[in-house]
Image (tube, rainbow, N blue to C red):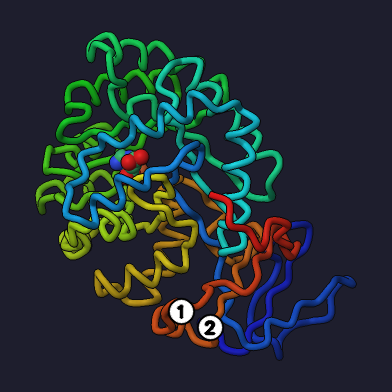
Amino acid sequence: MIEDAALRIEGGAVVWLGREQDLQPGPDAPELDAQGAVAVPGFVDPHTHLVWAGVRREEFVARLAGEQYDGGGITTTVAATRAATAEELFVLAAARGRRMIANGTTTVEIKTGYGLTPTDELKCLDVIGRLAKDLPWLVEATYLGAHVVPPGRDRAEYVEEVIATIPAAAAAGATWADVFCDEGVFTIDETRRILQAAQDAGLGTRLHAEEIAHTGAADLAAEMGCASADHLEHVTAEGAHAMAAAGVVGVLLPTVTLSLRTFAFGQYQVLREAGVPLALSTDCNPGTSWCESMPYVVQLACLVYGMPVHEALWSATRGAAMALQLRDVGRLSPKARGDVALLNAEHEADVVARLGAPGCLATIVRGQVWQNPAAPSVSA
Ligand code: NIG
Ligand code: FE
């Protein structure tokens, strides 16, 4: 933490930061007075399912009444997403994206996974490509054809179709592949085959792991050298050590655990004790985490895991950049992208202590102050 700090951005990149009293005169540039607000690197959100249509209200209300989540609701979103045009999906996702940027997010990973036919998955990748072009943030696109086996499809045939679609997904802009490897979804063996095919096609790999039950997916992420394993509510110490040894980043999604009401927050200590580098993310999706705010995730992580505030901010920026293998975001050192979130706080602890307040005052993207054209908005 630098007190009374100043930061200079030129050409979209950080060129200097330090104490304001040490700031040398430089080229003429607009000046922004943060008025004592905490400035952190623009948030990096390394796990989202932003492209969807439809709503899942009944499922959410049923969970409040005690129903358990088994991933079955995904097919509701798949039906609505298949029925939507690329233009409709873009309008919905762009509104969410603008609100995410207003909450301080400047880099985002976006998965497909609600199309689940080659045509619909590629349609979603086109939407992700447009989100990357039309909004002022950095986007990493992930192919998640292996989200669930769509109803009415033969499992083995569907796994073959996912594998066969990988080259087209890569051509449509995906640089990552992901699999929902869990009880009742894709098995360890199916997942291994899909990840191997993705790696053979030059894609990086990541995994939905150990969310519903302990399956050994964390060990598989380590075996396959995945960049990250995400969720991990049911990871064991053995899986955590395998991840640490292989350098797999653990992506924690506390809003999901909250939304699912399982209150299984113990994985943080298990992963931390094993020395796994940790990232935080919203997992923004219509079923298990309708959350567009990284400051809220940071707050929740501190309150439910007992994560120290500085560690949570690190996980939401640098740790999340590591999960995406990006070097020039999630930090504010010289040469990093000039992406900054000005938080609604005069001290980092206030981010967590102040409940229910907007987390972010302003977002700076490559040196430009982001004006949110979508605000105020109530669209889903
Ligand atoms: O990350 N776990 C699988 N996928 C999403 C949820 C998808 C959904 O329920 O629509 C997740 O939680
Ligand atoms: Fe997810």
For label 2, the residue is 345
Tell me which corner region of the image, top left, top right, bottom left or bottom right, holds residue 3.
Answer: bottom right
Q: List x then y, in percent, for residue 101.
A: 60, 58
Mark sitting on residue 273:
none
Q: Please provide percent x and percent y for residue 233.
A: 19, 52
Task: Give the left or right position of residue 2, taking residue 348 as reference.
Answer: right
Q: What residue sits 22% from the left and 48% below the top?
A: 245
Q: Which residue is at a point 39% across and 11% down the rendered structure image? A: 164
Dot 2 alpha-carbon crowd within 10 angstroms: few under 14, some 14 to 19, many 20 or more: many
Mark 1 CB in 8 Å range of ligand 2?
Answer: no
339 lies above or below 86: below
Asked if the residues shown at circle 1 and circle 2 are in contact, with their CB atoms under 8 angstroms apart, the answer is yes
Q: Amino acid at mark 2?
A: Ala
Please state which of residues 78 and 27 is positioned toward the viewer in this rendering.
Answer: 78
Secondary structure of the residue carrying tag 2 is loop
Q: CA distance from mark 1 to mark 2?
A: 6 Å
Q: Helix or strand or loop: what does disc 1 sit on?
A: helix
Direction from residue 288 to residue 210 in the image, left or right: left
Looking at the picture, tell me which residue is in the foreground, 211 or 72: 72
Within 10 Å of disc 1 (Cα), the crowding (few <14, some 14-19, many 20+) is many
Answer with the quadrant where ligand 2 appears in the image.
top left
User: Can the viewer see residue 15 in this picture?
Assistant: yes
Q: Is residue 173 above or below residue 131?
A: above
Q: Which residue is mark 1?
A: 351
Residue at 43 percent across and 69 percent down: it is 313
Q: Residue at x 65, y 57 (%)?
A: 337
Amino acid residing under circle 1: Val
In this rendering, does residue 274 appear at all?
Answer: no
User: Which percent across, then down, holds residue 228?
Assistant: 33, 44
Could you tell me residue 368's position as x and y percent? Answer: 75, 62
